[in-house]
Image (tube, grey):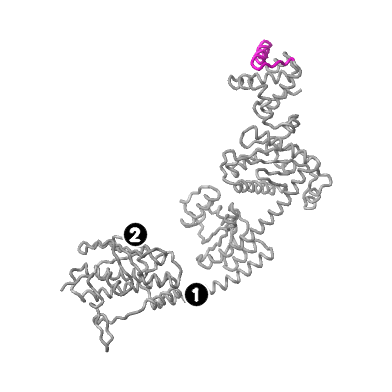
Amino acid sequence: MTKKASDITLNDMLELHDKDGDFLRLHRMIISSAEAWGALIRDLIMALGIERAKRFLLRYGWHCGVHEARIFKNMFQWEDDKEWVLAGSKMHDISGRVSSVPIKLNIQIKKGIFDVEGYWFNSYEATQYLKYFSHHHEPVCYFLVGYAGGYCSESFGKRIIFKEVACAGKGDEHCRFVGKTVELWGDEIADELVDYEQEDIGDELDRAYKRIEKQREVLKRAGTLSQSLTQIVLQGKGLDAIAEILGTTLNCSVLLENQHFETIAGFGDVTGYSLKSLMENKKALSDSQLGSINRMFQEHCATEFDLHEPFPFPHKRLTIPIVIRNQTYGFISVIKNEGEVGELEAAFLEQTANICAFQMLNEKTAIETEQRMMGELLDQLLTQPVENSYAAKKLSYLGYNLRQPHYVFIFRLEDPCMQLENEHAITAKRDDIINYLLKDASILDEKILLSSRLDRIHALVPESLIKKQYMPVKKYGEGLLKRLGNIVQPLKIVLGISDCCKDITQLNDSFNDSLKAIEIAKIKRQDNQVVLSSELGHLAILLDAKRPDELERYASKLLGQLYEYDQQYSSEFLQTLYNYLNNECNLYKTARFMNVSISGMRYRLGRIQELSGIDVSQSTTRFEIQMALEIYLVLGKIQFHKISK
């Protein structure tokens, strides 16, 4: 009588013999509890690690499936071969391992098609796993997957691989499986096929023991390294000593670079091994290393590099970032000309990177503390009278020479389009400017004092620094803003510069003059402007009583019509008026100065009076018009040379 898989019961398979202990119709099989299986799974994972335990259980399940498929082949007279295949799913239910419910059954033996999906409910394997471990990040029913693949492969006649795509052991509501032939899976199953390769449990245990011994040795050496590195930090020896300890321990070269890929410490021969020089000089790196470094450069300095030309100098290296408060402050690399860079180097490098981060944070904190103290003293110096002041004395004690001439620079940061989201972003840009100014001064072996507000930076710049640049102070300021432009984008900078202070008592007045220059630069509404306080002339007095925007409105009220006419018709009425007043209203002198005929000058003056209603015969009017013209000149609305008297 033919049999269907769905009709099989446990009674159909049982034949018990008291003497021989045979079970399942003379095939020697045993019944085991789920608890015992759970203990085995736990011990395998603890001894081998979950990845190796997974492969062992998969292969064990596979062999069980193959064996039971062979037993079932002749145990019943199957209605057809498909029923023999389906009996494996029924065996899951009968044995108590899991309740299997298929939702897709595309099994065509003659065509070689096997494509099934379904659910496993109440998996013993997932239940036992969760008794000893927390949810895993991937499915854990390894025996069930292996069994299904082994059984179906033997009964179907082609290699079938099952995958668990959902699992209670990783937090899903139910386990879910997919089974296909290797051909149907294609490349998707390539990684799983490796898990079915034959390995001996003894070899697994031996490798596990060796791995444990290796880890014990690594931990011992790591402890020694940690003690040495801690002592270096406590003794304040710095990054060079840290690089030396790591290099000596690993017998290799060590390179430390800042976030701009500039070398800050090293041990051994590291010449030409910086990340920047490797890319620029085409040193030997693998494609993966080239890609990694290229991504690093694009992230930190937005520079493109050619990755296709071969690099002639081979070496092995491992590089990881030094991170402080989720921000990269540098990179540490171990470099080997011989041998491989392995797990030991990676573990020690990560440990050392953490120590470097701690050391750099200490140095950064110390520098910030010093800068903050110097900044507070500078603010006192600029905003208060300095005679016998505490700030001046303290700065002299700290080694700063206040007796030399200085300029007061005030940088204002503006975000006209409101592109930066928060105050922290502006603060970060401001800190970048401060670091650049300090570095720029140190290159010239000069010291500058700096302080900051949210949107402002105050700098006391020695005249000697400007002289070393061999250019006027305004040109130096313009060049400085041009260099800072890339650093502060999308912010805009305006810079106010005072007259040179020959004496410390002039600093407070110079500071106020620079603030006035900043206000004028703001009104000009041009990007990255530099304004000297000396350019304000007598308007500096008015700026104490009026805001620059009020001065502009005052000037436009008198000269607005002439300004608009000049802009529209490219006439020179404002320049004519300016030269006429500065030549003491002398018609002939002004005509000669401007190369205009006398009749031409009379016509211009007449048109000026018609357009604006200005009567320059009145002394009060002349003064107001001269003042308005000076305002336009300072604000940059008109540009022409003043007459030398």
Q: Quadrant of residue 51?
A: bottom left
Instruction: Return the residue nearer the eye: 621 or 346.
Output: 621
Residue 166 drawn in magenta: no
Where residue 596 sits in the image (x, y, percent)?
A: 67, 14
Instruction: Return the residue nearer the eye: 369 or 535.
Output: 369
- Look at the picture and state if 506 lies above or below 39: above
Q: Which residues are magenta?
A: 595-617
Farthest-out residue, left: 1
Are the two marked residues, 2 and 1, in contact with CB atoms closer than 8 angstroms? no
* Residue under label 2: 187
Comes first in the chain, label 2 or label 1: 2
**Image check: 7 left or right of 131?**
left
Q: Residues within 10 Å of mark 1 (few under 14, many from 20)?
A: few
Q: Secondary structure at mark 1?
A: helix
Q: Amino acid under label 2?
A: Asp
- Look at the picture and state if 517 lies above or below 148: above
Where residue 430 sits in the image (x, y, percent)?
A: 64, 46
* Residue under label 1: 212
Where residue 390 sits in the image (x, y, percent)?
A: 81, 49
**Image check: 583 left or right of 388?**
left
Q: Quadrant of the N terminus?
A: bottom left
Instruction: Return the residue nearer the eye: 495 or 335.
Output: 495
